[in-house]
């Protein structure tokens, strides 16, 4: 028995260790990238080396990357690096609140539905299912068209879209933990529902929601980008990654850097968000961690 | 050798790919280089400005004015051979084996479907009386209806569907005679009854009626089978010029009988008939087998079996579609990409004269633009030369509504020069810190608006850019629901046809065709006098007076003169050719509208 067990360990260890190291490196690269993007977005107004993103003729129009304009310039000669940073600032400032509110509202609804079940679950699940059945982009388009193009309204639109998906995940997590032994034992020992909910279930759901938040951030950034691409996100002259892409698509042949570099920044950011989210989900998963 | 973990390697590959893509773009666009050297110190923006403008939405169905004053004696028949309608017996020909003459092209080939890119859909359907049409709408109308008169390069209108148009001595009566043998798509004759009905509909039209009423019409007398006499209450020396546009598209009485349904069921006498219309997507026209005109060899027209007009509002997207071969031909008012068009395609351009003007139009009835000091200050804050360099073809700033070569053009009209310090000081003194501007929601228009916003932000002005679609922009202009917006129009062909856009009597009430709500006594007087003036010299003097009044009142910020063109693939011939009935002086691509009756695809 002992030999068999040790054999399993020696066979599995060489595979697990490098894989974990790879994950570690990738994780830290992703984290570093996100820190860089978020820090530059937050600090954009105070970064002295950053050009005014609206200033025409910061360089020759439609010039590719150079020492003076790292990401090149657009059709008006505006510095694309500055525009990418400021675009990230607005894209993230839409995604942040949208996901934050989505986590709070969707999380609460999902946990209540998952823990209490019965009519609460029925009501919440019904609303969530209906909301998820709506075509997301059309729904967002409708909201922005009715309310008007502004930062607030775009944020509202993507927030409303994020709530049902997060609620469903929170409900699933709450359902899972509400049926776990330690909750049952606590209940048998006389713990009442507030304690069970806030001390036993919620602490186990929150890590999962936190990891979902990263994934949701990526989805919301794409959603905002999609709205920008069809011209109904935050109005001009505000800059988002999406409207930079939209502005560059018509000149993709003549000046591919306008769309490709910003698209690349957006892509790497989304990849980093997804990877961090996945890693968090894996590492914070209670079942994997404790069993 | 140490190997990086696979995930790290994939990140590195990604970075390398991005770096390669970035370096590939390093060449940039060549013409930008010089620009910067010259203009680096000029405009600059700060942060969140906001701006607006540009390119008028083809919308302005309105500003299709034209017609030069003066030479009103348009009675003479146009030349060319006879007008005998073709019986359709002409046989398709095949292109010759020898190399085609670039100027003339090979022998016309019958058949095929021309796919043509338009910049906008026409608002309110395809009845010219009720439609709000810009250059795109007029291009479609020219194929379905054709006009009673047609522009000549000498600045006069010549009869087209009409055989003659003759005034009495004091220009209060005009006798209009139709060409014989023209029939509408429904088989009804295009005769005096149809002509009378047409003018009755023009009078009843919401927008056309406004202009028509200005002539103080008294009566429409049918003289014979082909002739009518328009009796007016005032002299109108340039009536033929009005009949090249909305008021000149002759439709079948049966179409007018349809009332509201006429917008979807156009019936004209043009070379093509409506087959299918899906708004904002495609307008498909098919050959009219009974079309009246022939080519110089007597062959039946049109050559094409069908035309598909596709609406692609964004300039860059339209250009890309043409380059990708999705379009046979496409219209544009080309600025920054004029060189690309000229290099890559066969191009038919409007003439040097009678080009329209692109400008920022203020609503002079709404604060803060009801204050001439605000308008002047913002004009001083606008670096038009830089604007034209970045957004257009680098031409010098327009000095007024008239392009060089037109009667009203002035090299120095007195329009405020770029002087941001003076502008900023005035705006600070007046306490103006923000304005709103409307623009069409396409990338080109947005970029233009952002550029103006950036310039104005240097003067301490925040600009809120309100984006609307092209049709909405036109409606807002008619209703006066805007503060400032980009616009385009005014060919300078004829001062009198501009009166509906500029005279104060057309700016009161709703709907209004004087979109900018201009109320200027000098302009009014000049326009009134022009309606009765008969000498070209007098028209020139009046047009120059209007130009100076515009400069003093700063009702608009003038940017550039248009570069209207139609770009086509190499195998497309005969774009905007009207080989007969024009005295050999047909003015092509006038206002962006073209005739496709003599267009063919070779192969």
Image: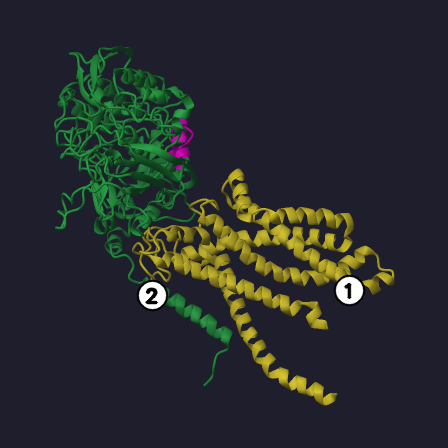
The residue to which callout 1 is attached is: A180
Q: Secondary structure at mark 1?
A: loop
Image point (54%, 39%), residue name: A147
Q: Which residues are magenta?
A: B470-484
Rendered green, the chain in question is: B
State whether residue B251 is above or below residue B602: above
Left/right placement of residue B432 relative to residue A145 reads: left
Q: Secondary structure at mark 2?
A: helix
State whether residue A92 is above or below residue B559: below
Q: Quadrant of residue B222?
A: top left
Position in image of residue B256 (x %, y %):
36, 21
Image quarter where the N terminus of chain A lies is bottom right
State whether residue B312 is above or below residue A275: above
- Confirm whether residue B362 shows in the render: yes
Q: Quadrant of residue B217?
A: top left
Q: CA distance from mark 1 to mark 2?
A: 56 Å
The residue to which callout 2 is attached is: B23
Q: Do badges 1 and 2 share one subunit? A: no
Along the viewing direction, whichever of B337 and B101 lies nearer the viewer: B101
Which color has been applied to chain A in this rendered view? Answer: yellow
């Amino acid at each position: 028995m002992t030999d068999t067990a040790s054999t399993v360990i020696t066979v599995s260890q060489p595979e697990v260790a490098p894989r974990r190291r790879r994950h570690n490196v990738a994780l830290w690269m992703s984290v570093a990238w996100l820190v860089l993007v978020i820090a530059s977005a937050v600090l954009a107004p105070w970064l002295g080396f950053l050009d005014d993103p609206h200033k025409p003729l910061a360089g020759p129009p439609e010039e590719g990357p150079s020492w003076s304009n790292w990401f090149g310039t657009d059709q008006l000669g505006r510095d694309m690096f500055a525009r990418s940073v400021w675009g990230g600032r607005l894209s993230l400032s839409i995604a942040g609140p949208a996901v934050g509110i989505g986590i709070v509202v969707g999380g609460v609804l999902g946990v209540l539905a998952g823990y209490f079940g019965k009519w609460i679950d029925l009501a919440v699940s019904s609303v969530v299912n209906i909301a998820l059945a709506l075509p997301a982009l059309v729904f967002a388009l409708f909201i922005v068209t009715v309310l008007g193009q502004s930062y607030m309204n775009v944020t509202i639109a993507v927030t409303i879209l994020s709530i049902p998906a997060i609620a469903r995940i929170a409900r699933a997590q709450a359902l899972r933990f509400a049926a776990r032994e330690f909750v049952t034992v606590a209940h048998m020992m006389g713990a009442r529902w507030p304690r069970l909910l806030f001390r036993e279930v919620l602490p186990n759901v929150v890590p999962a929601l936190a990891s979902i938040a990263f994934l949701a951030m990526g989805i919301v950034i794409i959603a905002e980008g999609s709205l920008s691409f069809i011209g109904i996100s935050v109005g001009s002259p505000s800059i988002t990654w999406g409207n930079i892409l939209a502005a560059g698509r018509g000149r993709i042949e003549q000046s591919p850097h306008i769309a490709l570099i910003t698209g690349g920044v957006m892509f790497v950011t989304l990849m980093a968000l997804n990877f961090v989210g996945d890693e968090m989900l894996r590492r914070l998963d209670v079942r994997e961690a404790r069993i | 050798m140490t190997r990086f973990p696979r995930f790290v390697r994939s990140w590195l590959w990604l970075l390398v790919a991005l770096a390669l893509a970035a370096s590939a773009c390093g060449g940039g666009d060549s013409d930008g280089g010089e620009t910067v050297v010259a203009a680096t110190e000029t405009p600059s923006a700060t942060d969140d400005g906001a701006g607006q403008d540009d390119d008028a939405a083809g919308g302005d169905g309105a500003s299709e004015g034209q017609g030069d004053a003066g030479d009103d004696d348009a009675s003479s028949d146009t030349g060319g051979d006879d007008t005998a309608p073709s019986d359709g017996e002409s046989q398709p020909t095949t292109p010759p084996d020898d190399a085609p003459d670039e100027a003339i092209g090979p022998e016309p080939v019958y058949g095929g479907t021309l796919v043509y890119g338009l910049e906008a859909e026409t608002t309110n359907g395809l009845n010219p009386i009720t439609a709000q049409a810009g250059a795109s709408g007029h291009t479609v109308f020219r194929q379905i209806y054709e006009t009673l008169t047609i522009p000549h390069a000498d600045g006069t209108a010549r009869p087209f569907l009409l055989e003659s148009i003759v005034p009495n001595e004091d220009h209060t009566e005009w006798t209009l005679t139709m060409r014989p043998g023209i029939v509408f798509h429904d088989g009804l004759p295009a005769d005096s009854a149809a002509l009378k009905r047409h003018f009755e509909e023009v009078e009843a039209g919401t927008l056309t009626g406004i202009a028509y009423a200005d002539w103080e019409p008294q009566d429409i007398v049918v003289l014979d089978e082909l002739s009518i006499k328009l009796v007016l209450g005032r002299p109108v020396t340039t009536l033929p010029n009005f009949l090249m546009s909305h008021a000149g598209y002759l439709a079948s009485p049966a179409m007018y009988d349809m009332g509201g349904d006429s917008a979807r069921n156009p019936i004209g006498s043009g070379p093509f008939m409506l087959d299918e219309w899906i708004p904002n997507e495609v307008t498909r026209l098919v050959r009219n087998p009974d079309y009246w005109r022939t080519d110089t060899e007597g062959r039946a027209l049109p050559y094409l079996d069908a035309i598909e007009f596709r609406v692609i509002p964004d300039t860059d997207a339209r250009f890309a579609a043409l380059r990708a071969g999705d379009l046979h031909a496409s219209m544009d008012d080309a600025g920054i990409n004029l060189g690309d068009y000229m290099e890559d395609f066969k191009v038919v351009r409007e003439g040097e004269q009678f080009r329209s003007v692109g400008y920022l139009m203020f609503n002079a009835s709404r604060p803060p633009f009801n204050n001439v000091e605000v308008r002047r200050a913002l004009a001083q804050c606008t670096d038009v030369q830089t604007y034209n360099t970045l957004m257009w073809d680098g031409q010098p700033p327009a000095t007024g509504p008239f392009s060089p070569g037109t009667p009203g053009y002035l090299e120095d009209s007195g329009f405020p020069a770029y002087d941001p310090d003076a502008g900023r000081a005035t705006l600070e003194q007046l306490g103006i810190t923000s304005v709103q501007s409307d623009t069409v929601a396409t990338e080109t228009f947005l970029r233009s608006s952002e550029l103006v916003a950036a310039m104005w932000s240097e003067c301490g002005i925040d600009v809120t850019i309100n984006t609307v679609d092209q049709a909405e922009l036109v409606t807002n202009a008619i209703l006066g629901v805007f503060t400032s917006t980009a616009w385009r129009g005014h060919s300078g062909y004829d001062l009198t046809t501009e009166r509906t856009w500029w005279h104060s009597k057309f700016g009161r009430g709703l709907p209004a065709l004087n979109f900018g709500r201009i109320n200027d006594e000098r302009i009014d007087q000049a326009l009134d006098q022009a309606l009765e003036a008969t000498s070209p010299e007098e028209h020139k003097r009046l047009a120059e007076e209007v130009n100076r009044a515009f400069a003093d009142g700063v009702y608009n910020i003038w940017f550039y003169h248009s570069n209207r063109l139609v770009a086509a693939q190499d195998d497309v011939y005969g774009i905007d050719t009207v080989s007969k009935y024009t005295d050999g002086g047909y003015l092509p691509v006038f206002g962006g509208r073209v005739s496709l009756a003599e267009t063919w695809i070779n192969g």
